[in-house]
Image: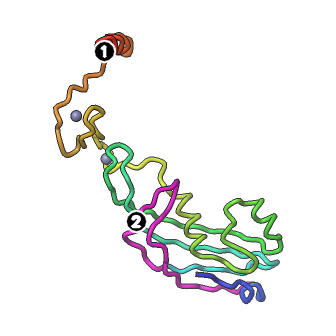
Amino acid sequence: MQINLTEILQLTGIQKNIPIDIEMETFNIAEQDYLIVEKNPFDLIITNMGDKELQIEGEFTIKLVLICDRCMGETPYEMNVSFIKNVNMNDTEESRVKDLNEMSYISGYTLDVEELIYDEMVIHFPMKVLCKDDCKGICNKCGANLNTTDCGCDTTQIDPRMAKILDIFNNSKEV
Ligand SMILES: [Zn+2]
Ligand SMILES: [Zn+2]
């Protein structure tokens, strides 16, 4: 959704509540597409603070299907985002972009709501994703999901110095 800011900029103190329906169906980050399974409409509140400064705020919840870092299984994730942005429309677009490299959601006098939502989701994207705190991960021998199967592989930790000796032993065996 694109919002024209010209009207809001004409009157100091004016506040607009704009109902937003999030359009995106998937969220793309780091060359991965994540399915959005739930999203709720929310109000975007834009206030003219005077002197061509706008305050843009909103709050939304969105549910995604992420991938567990340990077991690679799909895991639902709820993202709660709330933001307040102050944008000085006196600035040229160039200096705005320079000031805040996330400012790509405004070009000229048009606010791109999807771009704003996307930027906020990038900021709120979790550094680490786990399907559960005690996820057992996958077996590093056979790749089985250890949450659902007990593959029975011998995963005894080997002393790294010992492992080197075993490597040499195994390599010489192959020849
Ligand atoms: Zn997991
Ligand atoms: Zn295994």
Q: Point out which mark residue 35 bears.
A: 2
139 over 14 or under it: above or below:
above
Q: Position of residue 56 (x, y in %)?
A: 65, 74
Give the main secondary structure of the magenta stretch. Answer: strand
Q: Is residue 134 left or right of residue 22?
A: left
Please tell me whether mark 1 or mark 2 is closer to you in this view. Answer: 1
Q: Quadrant of ligand 2?
A: top left
151 over 21 or under it: above or below:
above
Q: Position of residue 144 (x, y in %)?
A: 24, 41
Q: Quadrant of residue 89?
A: bottom right
- What colour-coding does the image apply? rainbow
Q: Residue at x 17, y 42 (%)?
A: 149
Q: Point out which mark residue 97 bears.
A: none
Spatial CA distance of label 1 from label 2 is: 44 Å
Per the image, the residue denoted by label 1 is 170
Q: Specify whether residue 28 is painted magenta.
A: yes
Q: Residue at x 73, y 71 (%)?
A: 87
* Dot 1 amino acid type: Asn
Q: Is residue 43 left or right of residue 128?
A: right
Residue closest to the eye, 58 or 77: 77
Q: Specify whether residue 149 is painted magenta.
A: no
Q: Which residues are magenta?
A: 13-41
Which quarter of the image is occupied by the N terminus? bottom right
Residue closest to the eye, 81 or 123: 123
**First-in-chain label (1 vs 2):** 2
